[in-house]
Amino acid sequence: MECTVTWTGATSTRSNMGFVAETGSGHVLNMDGAPDAAKPENGGANLAPRPMETLLAGTGGCTAYDVVLILKRGRHPVTGCSVKLTSERAETDPKVFTKIHMHFTITGNVPASAAERAIAMSHEKYCSASIMLGKTAEMTTSFEILP
């Protein structure tokens, strides 16, 4: 797996801290820094997600993928799945994630025991992103099932 990230700030008239990531699979993702009122030349323009937000989003995508796949393989009639991630970060550099909570909303006639098992399997065995972030962050989960 590979990815090339290029700073666009040197040529951009819109953001000093913009970046474009091109993934090995040929997709493009824009990122930008937060505006810095004290030193505008060091800040972004809020034109795209922050790099740490994309890390959190990727983790959500990784675990939601696992949960849906595990439920489908178990022949459970899952019709929807979303996960809301909330996080806390260290106050000093490096500002790593220290707490991440994932709340899953699963739609379909899925038994609670199956949802709980799928989430646990993702976090204990399959989701590389959440397992990696779990090295610095306290990871917690919750879920609800909608018809």
Image (tube, helix red, strand yellow):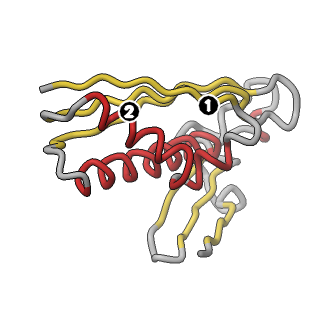
- Give the image quarter of residue 37: top right
Q: Which image quadrant is residue 94 in?
A: top right
Taking the image as shown, residue 18 lies to the left or right of residue 117, namely: right
Q: Quadrant of the C terminus?
A: top left
Q: Residues within 10 Å of mark 1 (few under 14, many from 20)?
A: some
Q: Residue at x 19, y 35 (%)?
A: 110
Q: CA distance from mark 1 to mark 2?
A: 15 Å
The answer to whether the residues at label 1 and label 2 have Cβ atoms under 8 Å apart is no
Q: Residue at x 63, y 47 (%)?
A: 131
Across and down, in percent, residue 69 comes to 31, 55
Amino acid type of the residue that numbered disc 2 sits on in the rendered structure = Glu
Number of marks in the rendered image: 2
Q: Is residue 141 visible?
A: yes
Q: Amino acid at mark 1?
A: Met
Q: Residue under circle 2?
A: 116
Of the pair 31 and 128, the residue shown nearer to us: 128
Crowd class of label 2 (few under 14; some 14 to 19; many from 20; radius 10 Å): some
Residue drawn at point x = 61 percent, y = 52 percent: 13
Q: Quadrant of residue 86?
A: top right
Kindly give the residue lying farthest to the front in the view shown. 113
The residue that label 1 is drawn on is 139
Spot occupied by residue 12 in the image (x, y as percentages of width and height): 62, 56
Foreground residue among 47 and 116: 116
- In the rendered image of this protein, does residue 74 appear above or below residue 88? below
- Mark 2 or mark 1, which is nearer the start of the sequence? 2
Secondary structure of residue under mark 1 = strand
In the rendered image, is residue 48 in sight? Answer: no
Disc sitting over residue 3 in the figure: none
Above or below, 104 relative to 74: above
State the image coordinates of residue 125 (x, y, percent, origin top left).
54, 52
**Left or right: residue 21 compared with residue 76:** right
Q: Give SS at disc 2.
A: helix
